Image (cartoon, rainbow, N blue to C red):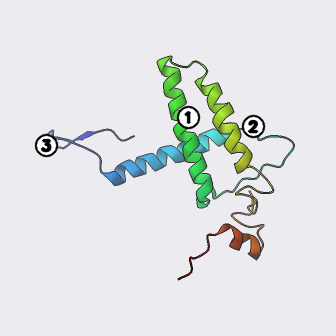
């Protein structure tokens, strides 16, 4: 995250603000997602990979990737501590494979109406877009 900084001139230690932590968190998360997907070679079966170039516009995907990231950090810690030498293998099997199946599901997944080269919801019909957006509550 963000290092604790000393105040110039006084040497007083100050804690990072919430917005600084959020920005650092967001940046680390985004970098992790970019790095992780640069390494992914197999998404399962002979299915076409369905990915949205604006993945952050899909709340479910952000939640799933955030959960994957958090679990990945935990697995790395377990591995470093020597508590679980199979931690990364467990992460791939119990976390990645489960979320991958949903994220990349061509027919029912959150990216089903997106096109990697043409963009977010490019392939969606009006009915598809309405179906994925939450409906306003009746007043």
Q: Which residue is mark 3?
A: 9
For disc 1, the neighbor class at 10 Å (few under 14, some 14 to 19, many from 20) is many
Q: CA distance from mark 2 to mark 3?
A: 51 Å
Q: CA distance from mark 1 to mark 2?
A: 18 Å
Who's the residue at 62% across and 74% down the image? 135
Instruction: Work out whether mark 3 precedes mark 1 in sequence or the reverse, and give the earlier one.
Output: 3
In front here: 65 or 90? 90
Using the image, tell me which numbered label, if any, was put on residue 72: 1
Q: Residue furthest right?
A: 46
Quadrant of residue 67 within the rendered picture: top right
Q: CA distance from mark 3 to mark 1?
A: 39 Å
Image position of 8 (left or right of 114): left
Residue 49: x and y in percent read 78, 49
- Badge 1 element: helix
Q: Give the vertical position of 86 relative to 65 (above or below).
A: above
In front here: 41 or 101? 101
Q: Residue furthest front?
A: 139
Kindly report which numbered mark, 3 or 1, lies closer to the viewer in this rendering. Answer: 1
Residue 70: x and y in percent read 52, 39
Q: Give the vertical position of 59 relative to 46 (above or below).
A: below
Residue 77: x and y in percent read 48, 26
Image position of 4 (left or right of 115): left
Using the image, tell me which numbered label, if any, was put on residue 41: 2
Instruction: Work out whether mark 2 precedes mark 3 in sequence or the reverse, and give the earlier one.
Output: 3
Image position of 13 (left or right of 105): left
In front here: 19 or 69? 69
Instruction: Work out whether mark 1 precedes mark 2 in sequence or the reverse, and give the earlier one.
Output: 2
- Badge 3 element: loop
Residue 127: x and y in percent read 76, 74
Kindly report which numbered mark, 1 or 2, lies closer to the viewer in this rendering. Answer: 1
- Badge 2 element: loop
Q: Could you tell me which quadrant the N terminus lies in? A: top left
């Amino acid at each position: 995250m963000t290092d604790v900084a000393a105040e110039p001139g006084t040497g007083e230690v100050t804690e990072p603000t919430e917005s600084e932590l959020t920005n650092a968190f967001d940046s680390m998360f985004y970098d992790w997602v970019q790095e992780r997907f640069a390494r992914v070679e197999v998404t399962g079966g002979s299915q076409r990979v369905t990915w949205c170039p604006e993945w952050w516009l899909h709340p479910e995907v952000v939640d799933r990737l955030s959960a994957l990231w958090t679990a990945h950090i935990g697995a790395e810690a377990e591995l470093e501590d020597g508590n679980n030498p199979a931690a990364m293998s467990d992460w791939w099997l119990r976390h990645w494979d489960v979320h991958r199946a949903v994220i990349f599901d061509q027919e029912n997944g959150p990216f089903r109406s997106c096109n990697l080269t043409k963009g977010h919801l490019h392939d969606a019909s009006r009915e598809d877009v309405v179906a994925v957006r939450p409906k306003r509550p009746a007043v």
